[in-house]
Amino acid sequence: MLNFLVFGAFLAIMALCLALINKMQQLREAQQKSNRLSASLDEMDEQAKLIIRTDMELNKTQEELDKKISGLSVLQKLSHNISTTLEENQIFKKIEMEFIRQLGFEKSLVVLWNNLEKKFIICLNLGYNDTELPKIDSAVNAEKERYLKLIREERNVSSLLTGPGFLPEDKIKHLFSVNHFIISPLLPKEGSPGFFLVGTRNLEPRITEGDCELITILTNQISQAIDNARLFEKAWNSQQELEIKVEERTKQLTNAFDEVKKMNQRKSDFISSVSHELRTPLTSIKGYAAILLAGKLGAVPAEVKERLEKINRHSDELVHMVNDLLDISRIESGKVVLKMEPLELKGIVEKISDLLSEQIRAKNITFTYSPGDNCDTLLADRNQIERVFINLMGNALKFTPQNGLITVTTNRVNGLVQINVVDTGFGIPENAQEAIFEEFYRVENPINQEVKGTGLGLTLVKRIVECHHGKIWVKSKLGAGSTFSFTIPAK
């Protein structure tokens, strides 16, 4: 019986041991689960913190982005506002307090350097009263070298970063009555520079880099607007000065032109009067010389006859000069009426060459006529155009030496016939090629000393050509001959 009880107690103890071992196993598993759960909770807590931080950063970034977008929208409106005027003093009136508030500030100043007075002047005041401005003006000019240096260095300062070499941050805050501020240089290319200040007394929100970027953009726009205004003012002033000068000069030229017209008219009237007065005694001189040469008053000795012939010849030259002067005077006064008609150019050239044939043969000169295509007909006054050919071909004969060559060529240019009289004569110096068409002008050269002339032939030719709405010019080189060219309307 005792053995049975012992054996039962042993079994009971074994059962309790097994139960205890089982419980301990369960406790270990539970502890492991608890540890794993605790680790998971810690990991979830870190992830939650990361999510919260990320969310806060995203919110901050979103707020900053929204602020920038809002700021850019305000800048766009403000830029449009200041670009609607080209007066410098009106630009600052376009910068209204509402725009500054929308950018997150409540105070603003524009201060420009006056180079004449050597001081800063406040040009825009938003958010400051009349008692604060004199203090600010005095303090800024007391430290003007620092502000000028800041402008020269083209850098911003703010409550975010004042930078070395400038005023202490607390001093700036106290002077401008702000807790946060941005000072940005105004750098127009035209005229004096300055700076733009914005600030707020609120402690929050603080100034950000985005705020500094927006204010930099704004100062660049204001600088550009100031540039445009100053350039416009300069251009307008220049235009006004130019208009006054043009008006004065026009008046002077008009008076001078009127005076020239009067003098020209008096000259023409004088020449016409004198020429008419010369004709009567010249006619008498030629008449008496002709009577004496004809022997109607008795026999004339050879020596006297020779001198009478010189009188007669010189009288003819004077008559020719008087006629040229009268013709020039009539053309200038508009008294010559041209009878415009189609003329065959070949017939005119042949007629004039036949008229000059004796002189051509005497100097053994080769004369040729080379017409271009579609240049056979002119629209001109026959008598006047023949005088042009007589003068030009006659001059070519005078100044072309023995065995020379004279050529008349033609070509068509824009509805006009261009006639060229080319010779192989002595030539004309370049500095005299315009002056030869002036009255009484003669080139100084050995040939002109031998060949007599009045200096009126080319003047008359020029007047006749211009009456036909053409023009005349010369190309020449000393020792290589000359080419006189003129244009006349085609048929």
Image (cartoon, helix red, strand yellow):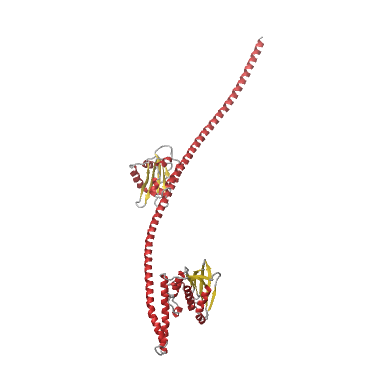
Front position in the image: 101 or 446: 446
Q: In the image, is residue 94 above or below residue 369?
A: above
Please give left or right for residue 25 compared with residue 159 in the image.
right
24 in relation to 59, above or below: above
Image location of residue 318, percent across then percent down: 41, 79
Rendering quarter of residue 74: top left
Q: Quarter-wise, where is residue 137 in the image?
A: top left
Name the quarter where the N terminus is drawn: top right
Q: Percent from the top left, x then y, of residue 131?
A: 33, 42
Tell me residue 15's x, y (percent): 64, 17
Q: Position of residue 31 (x, y in %)?
A: 58, 25
Who's the residue at 60% across and 22% down the image? 26
Which is more toward the observer, 47 or 412?
Answer: 412
Camera-side residue of 20 and 359: 359
**Residue at the extreme top:** 1
Q: Please tell me which residue is depicted at 53% across the width and 32% down the height of the picture.
A: 48
Tally of marks: 0
Residue 490 higher or lower than 241, as above or below: below
Query: In the image, what residue occupies the spot 57% across and 27% down?
Result: 37
